[in-house]
Amino acid sequence: MPEHTSHRICSETWQISEFNLVNFFLVEGKDRAAVIDTGCGLGNARSAVMRLTDKPLSILLTHTHFDHMGGIYRFTDCPVFMKSDEEGKHTFSLGTGKAFLRHYVETRAAVLMKGKEAELLSLIAEEETDVPFSFSELDDGDIVDLGGRTLECIAVPGHTAGSLCFLDRKERLLFSGDCVNRSVILPRQKDGSMRIVKQYHDSLMKLMKMEKEFDALAIGHNGPLENKSLIRDYLTLSEGLLNGSIRGKYMEKGFRKGEDASYGDAELWYQCDQ
């Protein structure tokens, strides 16, 4: 049976890969450990975490798309923290719960784990995975103290309204969720406006102003680590889309459909249907 794989990326910090589909992270302090996102819900994310730490856990969500919080049902006894803008908005276009997982495997795994689809489908839990949970709100500038180690919350709306990054100043690492990956999705606006591209651009500007505080990105997909220069590529790309110097085109590539544009190592689906 396939299992999650883990990779130590710096002191007391691990990337946990959920079958090459999505990453989540474990950050350990003296008193507690933070689980940043919980995977999409395939297999047992809790077991993967407990192989690495015996500290009490806090769950920090970068955002509530189901591929990043689908494993929350394994952590219902742990305190959960996220931005309130995310409440009740944990869908993109693929649904929730078991239906989401089936669709996710059939679309994503068919590209990223070709030939492993049947094995991954067998990891869908018998119980319902879309469970209610309570949370405490995090906001821009809030500090999560794990004991001798802190994570600073940075609000970065764009991919979702309540997206957060978490900055570990001690290890000079930014956990970027889906704000900065090799490929970023911004949902299609029904009126065709570039409002979310502008919002995303402003979030990137905020990260650029803090770039001296971190050396690398711990990203939500692929990775485990990415050069922080990727932020600058996305900033150039979003600025070009806004001023008209860069133009995207409609694409259907793999499991994605929508308007797509690239610059350097950055790829932005800025009017994305799926």
Image (tube, grey):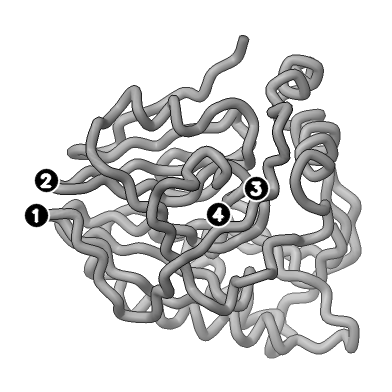
Q: How many marks?
A: 4
Query: What amino acid type should be assigned to the residue bearing mark 4?
Result: Asn
* Percent coordinates x, y for residue 170 in the rendering: 15, 57
Query: What amino acid type should be assigned to the residue bearing mark 2?
Result: Lys
Among numbered discs 4 and 3, the one appearing first in the sequence:
3
Q: Are marks 3 and 2 in contact (CB under 8 Å)?
A: no
**Residue drawn at the location 60% of the way across and 85% of the way down:** 199
Q: In the picture shown, does residue 21 fall above or below 267?
A: above
Q: Are marks 4 and 3 in contact (CB under 8 Å)?
A: no
Mark 2 surroundings: few (<14), some (14-19) or many (≥20) residues within 10 A = few
Among numbered discs 3 and 1, the one appearing first in the sequence:
3
The quarter of the image holding the C terminus is bottom right
**Residue drawn at the location 82% of the way across and 35% of the way down:** 102
The quarter of the image holding the N terminus is top right
Q: Which residue is mark 1?
A: 148
Q: In the picture shown, does residue 258 fall above or below 252?
A: below
Measure the C-alpha gap from mark 3 to mark 2.
Answer: 29 Å
* Percent coordinates x, y for residue 236 in the rendering: 56, 75
**Residue drawn at the location 51% of the way across and 63% of the way down:** 134
Q: Which residue is mark 4?
A: 181
Q: Which residue is mark 2?
A: 30
Tag 4 secondary structure? loop
Tag 2 secondary structure? loop
Q: Which residue is mark 3?
A: 67
